Image: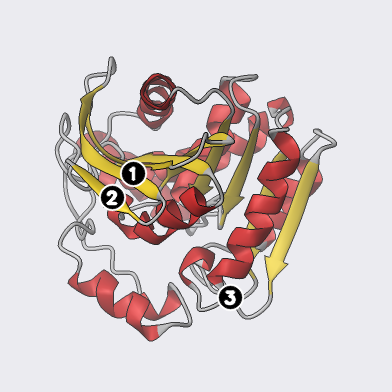
């Protein structure tokens, strides 16, 4: 399905990836030749439809934007909602989706933009698939997830015994953004994952620990972004990430007053402008 946005061609539909995922995806192509291809990676429990404003805005800056619903999320098919066998499936899916987006758009300069769990996926991708992209931006990356010892042991055990068991994992919508309408829409959104499986939760936790063992492998220029008032993912994780990265071409921006979803804050265009400034420097 194609639509015309002002200054952009919007398309949505399914693509069968070699990994077995029938990925629902959305894309924006600018009217003029695209300077680069931005691949979005959304966060835990959400979906690509929450990034419509980002895609439209990026196209106005002459960037193509492609984003798919992650395995077990949104409208994508190939796995039951809220379940994955391994966090590495996200990484394999992303690699296949990048290949598809390059072919479909005809744009080679590739940039990754990941939020929250999507930011963690991007970090793993950069460490494990080096040299594939020009640069990356992560916002609110889920690098610090803490559970009490007994709860962590129980989670690991239950994820092995009953991996498909679903639990309520409520997120306070007021923690997403200082704009109340963002949380209200989130609650009403039928595509938001309300009951994830124990396996998905454990794999996310495990990946948040593993990244600290491989972070030095990242050699791609990267901009790290976080809201100072984020109470879902501790911004201290982004500060530590910046310090641990060995790559010299790196940036860190902590936005005062912003919460978890910096691209859904009232001043989100300021964040986008900073992202564009970073990307522009790396696709010349």
Question: On the image, numbered disc 2 is attached to which residue?
Answer: 4
Question: On the image, numbered disc 1 is attached to which residue?
Answer: 9
Left or right placement of residue 78 versus residue 113 in this view: left
- The quarter of the image holding the C terminus is top right
Residue farthest along the right direction in this orientation = 248
Residue 262 visible in image: yes
Of the image marks 1 and 2, the number of the one nearer the N terminus: 2
Question: What separation in Å lies between label 3 and label 1 (alpha carbons)?
Answer: 31 Å
Q: Residue at x 52, y 34 (%)?
A: 33
Q: Nearer the viewer, mark 3 or mark 2?
A: 2
> Which is more toward the observer, 153 or 75?
75
Tell me the colour scheme of the image: secondary structure
Of the image marks 3 and 1, the number of the one nearer the N terminus: 1
How many C-alpha atoms fall within 10 Å of the one at disc 2: few (<14), some, or many (≥20)?
Answer: few
Left or right placement of residue 111 versus residue 30 in this view: right
How many C-alpha atoms fall within 10 Å of the one at disc 1: few (<14), some, or many (≥20)?
Answer: some
Q: Is residue 81 above or below residue 57?
A: above
Q: Position of residue 232 (x, y in %)?
A: 48, 67
The disc at residue 240 is none
């Amino acid at each position: 399905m194609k639509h015309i946005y002002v200054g952009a061609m919007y398309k949505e539909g399914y693509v069968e990836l070699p990994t077995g995922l029938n990925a629902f995806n959305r894309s924006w192509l600018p009217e003029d030749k695209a300077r680069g291809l931005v691949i979005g990676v959304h966060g835990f429990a959400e979906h690509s439809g929450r990034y419509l404003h980002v895609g439209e805005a990026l196209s106005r800056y002459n960037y193509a934007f492609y984003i798919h619903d992650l395995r077990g999320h949104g409208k994508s098919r190939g796995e039951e909602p809220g379940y994955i066998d391994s966090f590495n499936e996200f990484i394999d899916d992303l690699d296949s989706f990048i290949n598809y987006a390059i072919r479909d758009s005809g744009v080679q300069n590739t940039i990754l933009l990941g939020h929250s769990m999507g930011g963690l996926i991007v970090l793993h991708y950069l460490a494990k698939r080096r040299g594939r992209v020009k640069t990356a931006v992560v916002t609110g990356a889920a690098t610090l997830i803490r559970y009490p010892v007994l709860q962590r042991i129980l989670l690991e055990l239950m994820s092995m015994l009953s991996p498909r068991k679903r639990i309520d994992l409520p997120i306070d919508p007021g923690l997403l953004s200082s704009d109340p309408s963002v949380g209200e829409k989130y609650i009403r959104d039928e595509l938001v994952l309300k009951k994830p499986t124990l396996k998905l939760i454990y794999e996310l936790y495990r990946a948040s620990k593993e990244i600290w063992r491989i972070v030095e492998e990242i050699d791609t220029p990267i901009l790290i972004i976080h809201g100072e008032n984020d109470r879902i993912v501790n911004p201290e994780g982004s500060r530590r990430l910046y310090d641990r990265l060995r790559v010299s071409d790196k940036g860190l921006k902590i936005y005062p007053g912003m919460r978890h979803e910096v691209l859904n804050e009232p001043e989100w265009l300021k964040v986008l402008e900073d992202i564009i400034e970073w990307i522009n420097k790396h696709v010349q």
